[in-house]
Image: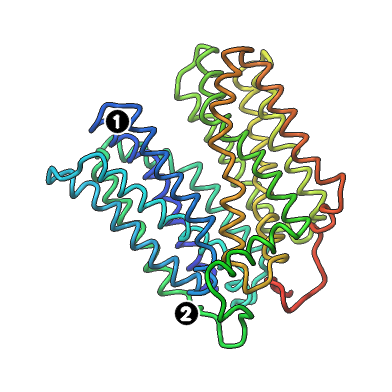
Amino acid sequence: MRGVAGLVTAEALCYTATRVAMIAIPWFVLESTGSPVSMGLVAFFEIGSYTLARLFGGPLLDRAGQRAVSVRADLVAAGAVACVPLLYSAGLLPFPVLLALVTLVGLATGPAEAAKVSMAPAVAERTGTRVERVTGLTGTVDRLSMTVGPVLAGGFVSLAGPLPALYANAVLLVAAAATLAATQPRDRPAPGTDPEAGSGYLVRLRTGWRVIWTDTTLRALVVMLAVTNMIDMSVTSVLLPVWVRENGMGPAVVGLMGGVLGAASVAGSLVATAVGHLLPRRAVFFAGLVVAGPPRLLVLALDVPLWAVLAVWGLCGLGGGVLNPILSTVLFERLPRHVVGRGTAMIGALTRVAAPLGAPVVGAALGLAGAAPVLVACAALYLVAVLAPLAGRAVGGLDAPEPDPGRAQTPG
């Protein structure tokens, strides 16, 4: 179990660093420039480079090995983050240099996170652990970091300031790299195990795309998640703050609702980790999707007290918590072993590619129609997106397949 514990610990350190950066970097930009436009530019460069790196960096994961990419990319990201307070303190951080550094952080973080996620089937196989249990543990860590991480990060930034928080971010990334290096063996493909060993980058990239897009189940999941992620991003960045303000409440309520949702997600993820492999996967997956999304939006369109909203959001969190372990397991079962790295990275990028587009559209719709109609429309679109796969053949791919030595799965 040392390998499982090492992977989970490395992911916990990396996710915590990400939560610290989500608060420390924007706050640093706001304090140093006083410009919301500059904050938007920094976010655009970091998120854009992150997405591009995940989309195009997959072949490197399979060729160099997930462990090597993760360790080195975490160290690069740590160095780039540490340069921000160092250069600023020395008076050597003009805004273009800051943009270059956050771009480098995004370029390194994208492959590093994809590498850790794609290590799950190999770690499960080496340790004799069910892949559902490994993905459940890593999913729980992710959910827990979304619940506790922002609170701790916000408190640290408030007490110590953004510059010490950025140093702490760099230390966490170095710790993640060291933990993974110490607990996971080198994982370069053995001779004869990679049918594309002599192929170039573009051939490998095209293979990753072809594997995903010709698989009916994976293609349906990518399209569905692109839509739901777009809606979720719009809720977080636009709809929820507007709803809170229109109801005479402050930003603390936004944090409270996020905390309730995140805590319930952790509970759901723990349940999936413990007994998920015993439950009917397809039924649990679609039930979780239906519970996680539309009710969370519809309750905001109703005139109900805050306690009722929090109760519904808690129920939605339970539904959402069971999804990631199932999604990860299906992904690893359907990707050939030599394509796991690039497939994982590419799917992560494709499911996020539409996320930045929703907020401007929703913002414009709010000005025209108000919050309630937009919330109802988003809930309806969410429901259509998650139920659409039921109408085709894609749904059959969610069931556990027969054992296949060429697939990235773990027996027993």
The residue beneath circle 2 is: 186
Type of amino acid at the residue the image marks with label 2: Arg
Expressed as whole percent of the image width and height from the top left, the position of residue 275 reads 73, 58
Q: Residue at x 32, y 57 (%)?
A: 78
Q: Alpha carbon of mark 1 to alpha carbon of mark 2: how far?
A: 42 Å
The residue beneath circle 1 is: 30
Expressed as whole percent of the image width and height from the top left, the position of residue 123 reads 57, 72
Badge 2 element: loop
The quarter of the rendered structure image containing the C terminus is: bottom right
Label 1 crowding class (10 Å Cα cut-off): few <14, some 14-19, many 20+? some
- Within the image, what quadrant is residue 339 found in? bottom right
- Within the image, what quadrant is residue 365 found in? top right
Label 2 crowding class (10 Å Cα cut-off): few <14, some 14-19, many 20+? few
- Mark yes or no: residue 125 visible: yes
The quarter of the rendered structure image containing the N terminus is: bottom right
- Mark yes or no: residue 2 visible: no
What's the mark number on residue 124? none
